[in-house]
Amino acid sequence: MSQSAKILVIDDDPDFRAAVTPILKSALYDVVTAANPQEAKEKIFSEKPDLILLDIMMDSLFDGFSLCQAIKTSKEYAEFKNVPVIFISAVKEIAGSRFQFKGDEEGMVGPDDYIDKPVKPDDLLSRIAKLLKKQ
Amino acid sequence: MIERKPIVLVIDDEESMRDSCSLILAKEGFQAEVAADGQVGLEKARDLKPDLILVDLKMPGVSGFEVLEKIKDIDPQIISIVITGYATIESAVEAMKKGAYDFLPKPFTPEELRIIIRRGLERRKLALEAESLRREKKLLEENFITLVSHQLRSPLVAIEQYFEVILAGLAGGVDATQKEMILRARERLEGLLRLINDWLDLARISRGQIIDKIKPMALEKVLAKEIEFLKPLAADYGVSLEFSPPEKPALVQGDEQSLEQVFSNLISNAIKYNKPKGSVVLSIRKEGDFVVTDVRDTGIGIAREHLPFLFDQFFRVSRGENQKSKGTGLGLSIAKKIVDLHHGTIKVESELGKGTTFSVWLPKADENAP
């Protein structure tokens, strides 16, 4: 790619957005953020990110899984269906145990990767690089 | 809470009894249903879901006693009132034992019927309320644990995230002193996170939630997995890990995930409380109906006076200011609870300065079990 990739960070925690931005910028990515489902949708359409980091532990009303599903399969988000999505979460919080994505069982399309909080900078960056290379 | 009209089902082979009861019930504003025998009575109960049944003991075919028993399968909270012309102490006692709420000997007046029905329905209301409260409480508790978990961990995770970014030098330069302090702060944070995890584990165990499914499983697989996982830790401490798997699979009745937790705890303790160049040896043996796993270490041992307290919550043997152990003091308590829930037991033998052996007894599973 001739220009740097743009990454959209969707997380309602301002501290996480503030902490992860320098990580992404250190790898010369453009960073845009969204703090809620509404903003997330707006930014996806207006900024057209190359990759999405999505926190699935937001407000219980917002289901990150559904947004991912929508991005990858719905007509509305058709132009974004190949945008890689990484679930970010304090995953161990959910079950207190090792997380297992049961997407296939429920007929859901899962994320391209998932990473636990707190994210280690090099871990996050290498996963992003891998997914962007595939594009 | 009964929001609809209370439904009373009268099961009696005598037509006059069915008719007169229905009249009285209808006058009281109840929905009266009838059945001429026990079989029909049970079927109607299944369809109509009455709040209360009036059942005659002496009926041909399916008897009143049988109705009393079988109705509990349809609705455990249903109120059964027994009516019969053959009122003996024996039959009254037997009816109560079979779950009848009360007993009304024939002949009875309309007023007597009204009174007993009202009492029965009042009782029914209470029973239903208690049941729904119980369910709500369970839900709240489960949500509470999840909520507390989230509320407690979230801020700590946010702090950790900042540490990661700072330590990676992504928020400006970090000199050696600053780095040292941040690393120490992170250690304290991780200790707190471990404590929260352990405490929540205990909360879930007390509710029996930690055991997902107990089924026959091969114990040696769990041990092999934990040993593999703890090899790096053993290397750090300069301790060897030995395990010779049994020739035949050691099948136990267990929940894999929670047993992993038990052995993870025991083996890592054996590593951490060991001597340099020491060893941790695991072995499995059979004792009657149990499969026993021994975790033997050549460590510092435990003083006899400490042994009774070993499995108490937060008990830790003090080792002075330079305590290397970062444990929460809950590990053994959790391990014991998990093993207890498996109907097993943990035993410990130790000699100060020589070493310790923890033995986990688990019920063996039949090879031919489903």
Image (cartoon, coloured by chain):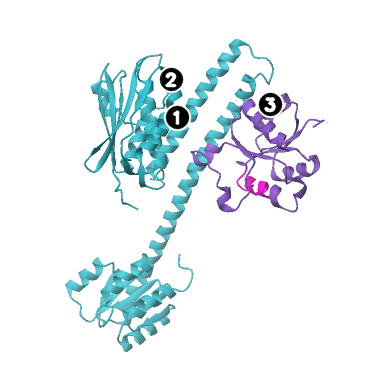
Highlighted magenta segment, given as a residue range = A58-69
The Cα atoms of the two marked residues, 3 and 1, are separated by 30 Å
Residue B51, percent from left and from top: 40, 71
* Residue that sits furthest to the right in the current view: A2
**Chain that bears disc 2:** B
Name the disc covering residue A23, or none: 3
Residue type at numbered disc 2: Ala
Q: Residues within 10 Å of mark 2 (few under 14, many from 20)?
A: few
Residue at 34% over, 70% down:
B71
> Is residue A66 a member of the stretch shown in magenta?
yes
Q: Which chain: purple?
A: A
Between circles 2 and 3, the one closer to the viewer is 2
Q: How many marks?
A: 3
Is residue B287 in view from this perspective? Answer: yes
Q: Could you say which is closer to the camera, residue B27 or residue B348? A: B348
Q: Is residue B309 magenta?
A: no
- In the picture of the structure, the residue carrying the numbered disc 1 is B229
Q: Are marks 2 and 3 on the same chain?
A: no
Lateral position of residue B194 relative to residue B64, left or right:
right
Chain identifier, colour cyan: B
User: Quarter holding the N terminus of chain B?
Assistant: bottom left
Image coordinates of residue B263 in percent, x first then y, are: 37, 33
